[in-house]
């Protein structure tokens, strides 16, 4: 029983970060109705940026996370203007090709510049643990989960309390109506892409203390992102956060019965069944059940 409780608790910590990693992807889709297949590479760039900034400034990766977020925001807006905006009304096949191509360019570009080496950082809390009610938690996971919680609160306040956040939500609901209100959807698209990129890159900085990074690590996370987004419902920020917790617990629990090499297998099984049985997401299914 203790082992199960420990796995569930670890899964919640990991899942909170999965939610942060994926919320940028679902935000982009909700506002722009486009799936960014390069989102894994955005995570990788966030990890790389945090690595080099922490080395250059002699600071902890969590300390440079806000700076990484600024880099991510600017990078996201630039890539939206150069790559996404020209294909926003193109067929989905063209959008897929463009974003997959963007991901390949980013991964291979970083490999060319920084080398195809595994990089890691050493922190003062790397071996530190917290013991609560007989359960042991790695400090790196706890700090990452706290950062994810803070970012979720900040995003919620932005979307619900600020003028730009409300305009972004309105754009996701009715693009034609917001134009009649004087809101330019193109600016909302750029803002959404910038914020989505910033969130994902901040997540990259947050997981760096306990994860090795290299130019192609984004490919390891993109399927987890899609699982979280599909399970939570495409375009649902709250759903992505909840689904991230679910995926984290499933992945953590799977290590009790499966070799670590295939710990993601249950996650991909969940992705398949979520795609087939509940394409609208768990949150939408719960709401429908409550209305019956």
Image (cartoon, rainbow, N blue to C red):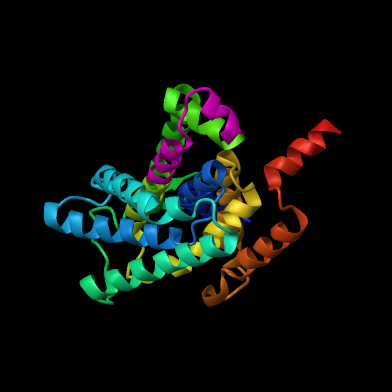
The location of residue 91, given as percent across then percent down, is 58, 59
In this view, the residue farthest toward the right is: 292
**270 to 150, vertically: above or below:** below
Q: Residue at x 35, y 62 (%)?
A: 44
The location of residue 87, given as percent across then percent down, is 48, 55
The location of residue 271, given as percent across then percent down, is 65, 62
The location of residue 179, given as percent across then percent down, is 52, 29
- Quadrant housing the N terminus: bottom right
In the image: residue 212, left or right of residue 224: left
- Quadrant housing the C terminus: top right
**38 to 183, vertically: above or below:** below
Front residue (pair 245, 191): 191
**103 to 158, vertically: above or below:** below
Q: How many marks?
A: 0
Front residue (pair 101, 179): 179
Q: Is residue 119 visible?
A: yes
In the image: residue 57, left or right of residue 104: left
Residue 2: quarter of image: bottom right
Q: Is residue 209 visible?
A: no
Q: Is residue 207 magenta?
A: no
In the image: residue 292, left or right of residue 67: right
Q: Is residue 176 magenta?
A: yes
Front residue (pair 269, 235): 235
Q: Residue at x 46, y 64 (%)?
A: 98
Q: Which residues are magenta?
A: 174-194
Q: Examine the residues drawn in magenta and state their main secondary structure.
A: helix
């Amino acid at each position: 029983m203790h082992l199960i409780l420990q796995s569930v608790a670890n899964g919640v910590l990991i899942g909170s970060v999965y939610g942060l990693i994926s919320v940028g992807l679902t935000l982009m889709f909700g506002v722009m109705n486009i799936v960014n297949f390069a989102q894994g590479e955005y995570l990788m760039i966030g990890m790389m940026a945090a690595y080099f900034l922490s080395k250059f400034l002699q600071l902890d990766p969590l300390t440079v996370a806000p700076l990484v977020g600024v880099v991510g925001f600017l990078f996201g807006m630039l890539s939206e203007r150069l790559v996404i905006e020209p294909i926003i009304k193109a067929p989905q096949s063209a959008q897929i090709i463009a974003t997959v191509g963007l991901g390949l360019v980013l991964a291979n570009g970083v490999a060319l510049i920084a080398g195809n080496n595994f990089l890691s950082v050493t922190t003062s809390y790397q071996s530190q643990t917290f013991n609560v009610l007989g359960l042991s938690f790695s400090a790196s996971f706890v700090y990452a989960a706290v950062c994810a919680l803070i970012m979720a609160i900040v995003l919620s306040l932005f979307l619900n309390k600020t003028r730009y956040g409300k305009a972004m939500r309105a754009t996701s609901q009715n693009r034609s109506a917001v134009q009649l209100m004087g809101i330019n959807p193109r600016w909302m698209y750029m803002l959404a892409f910038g914020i989505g990129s910033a969130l994902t890159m901040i997540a990259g900085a947050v997981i760096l203390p306990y994860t090795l990074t290299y130019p192609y690590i984004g490919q390891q996370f993109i399927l987890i992102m899609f699982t979280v987004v599909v399970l939570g419902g495409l375009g649902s920020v709250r759903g992505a956060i909840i689904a991230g917790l679910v995926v984290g617990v499933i992945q953590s629990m799977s290590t009790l019965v499966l070799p670590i090499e295939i710990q993601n297998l249950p996650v991909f099984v969940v992705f398949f069944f979520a795609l087939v049985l509940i394409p609208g997401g768990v949150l939408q299914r719960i709401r429908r059940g409550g209305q019956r």
